[in-house]
Amino acid sequence: MAANSINILLIEDNLAYARLLQEFIKQANSHELNIIHVTYLAEAIKKVSKDTYDIILLDLTLPDSEGLASLAPLMSQAPSIPIVVLTNTNDDELALEAVRRGAQDYLVKREVNPAVLLRSLRYAIERKQVLEQLRVANQGLENRVFESTAELVKAKEINQSKSEFVSMLSHDIRNPLNTIMLAAGLLQNNDEKLPKEKKLSHFQLIRSAIKNMAQLLDEVSFIGKADAGKIQCDFTCFDIEEFCRAIVAEAQLTAAEKQVNIVFYQQGKLDEALWDESLLRHILNNLLSNAIKYSHPGGKVLFEVIAQGKTVIFKIQDRGIGIPQKDQQQIFQTFHRAENVGQIPGTGLGLAIVKKCTEAHGGEISVDSEVGVGTTVTVSLSGLVPEDF
């Protein structure tokens, strides 16, 4: 079979209809289409086990199989090959059930013409490719969960806090995974019926869920590296104020959903110095995220940057639920969460990451908080002198 052609496996025991489909392929005037015809399901299974095909056209009534029983063996032998089922005029309900079980499309035989056939083939191939990409992405994310969890378990002795964390992580990963599977399923089963705006909405849900999972996994991986002493600093020169304003802009969407207003201002002017952008991003993203998360709807978060020569002080203040006094001594411990967080979601990693990043940068961090009044977190960092770097 030609390397650049679209190789079609036609499984059809009606020789006259098989010749008609082959003629439709010729009429499509597409030299890239190459069709191989077999009449038995068993023969088709042998074909897909040793040759490469881009798509299968499957008649649901065969001499050695009938109805949905024909679908499962093919999907088991070749799960990545898209399948378009061929039905008679009275088989619509059966064809729709086949699509629900994994086929990409169906064609009513008497309604097929060259244009319809070509469109269905290309549509089914593209659709299967998208679903396969999502499956691979999901598998990759699941593998990262296992790898990151294993790294954490090696870094510290297993205790009750870790057991609770693993349960929490599994729950937090499952939510976006369910979103991905639900949105992908809706796209698969209702693609032709969905308006363009609804399709875009489903794809945005998938992208957002993947982003949330990746961010959570990055935090888990970072803690594992920090506990293993593998944090490496990469100091560069960049504009701190511009960097902070970009961080605020990224946080505005989350703040808007919570109806929280972020107020940013800077005092003083920094001398030229070198900073680790990655560590600083971890620090500010987590502090702003926490301030927004634990604020009351309609509240305000103050983000102040105070420049003193080559030292910069970051103050992030919220007027939210506050931290109980007895929790303030443990708030930087991995997995620890204050007793008053209630149903507010979280993993207990944010402040632990902030402290580890601050220490890796050679800085200091402090917390001033009162229940019902709010929390102020202050981070002081000194940049490296360029000529001494």
Image: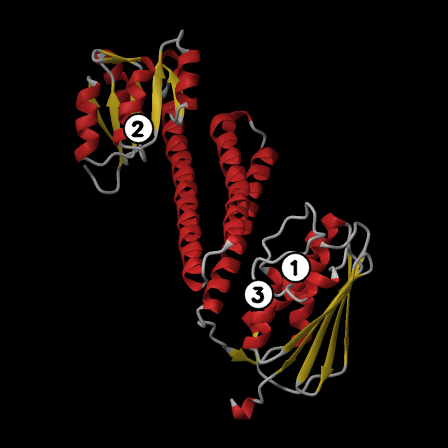
**Which comes sooner in the sequence, label 1 or label 3?**
1
Q: CA distance from mark 2 to mark 3?
A: 45 Å
Which label is found at residue 294? none
Tell me the SS state at disc 1. Answer: helix
Instruction: Return the residue nearer the eye: 139 or 220.
Output: 220
Residue labelled with disc 3: 353
| Image quadrant where residue 40 sits | top left
Instruction: Return the residue nearer the eye: 207 or 219.
Output: 219
Tell me the SS state at disc 3. Answer: helix
- Location of residue 211 in the rendering, given as x and y in whole percent from the top left corner: 54, 51
- Location of residue 97 in the rendering, given as x and y in whole percent from the top left corner: 42, 18
Q: Amino acid at mark 2?
A: Met
Q: Estimate how packed mark 3 is, as few (under 14), some (14 to 19) or many (20 or more) residues with alpha carbons within 10 Å.
A: many
Q: Amino acid at mark 1?
A: Glu
Instruction: Return the residue nearer the eye: 181 or 157.
Output: 157
Task: Kindly tell me whether residue 26 is visible in this rendering.
Answer: no
**Which comes sooner in the sequence, label 2 or label 3?**
2
View extreme (bottom): residue: 387
Residue at 50%, 50% (x, y): give it.
163
Residue labelled with disc 1: 250
| Image quadrant where residue 2 sits | top left
**Which comes sooner in the sequence, label 2 or label 1?**
2
Q: Specify the color scheme.
A: secondary structure
Residue labelled with disc 2: 75
Residue 288, compared with residue 42, is above or below; it is below
- From the viewer's perspective, tell me whether residue 338 is left or right of residue 320: left
Q: CA distance from mark 2 to mark 1?
A: 43 Å
Residue 35, compared with residue 236, is above or below; it is above
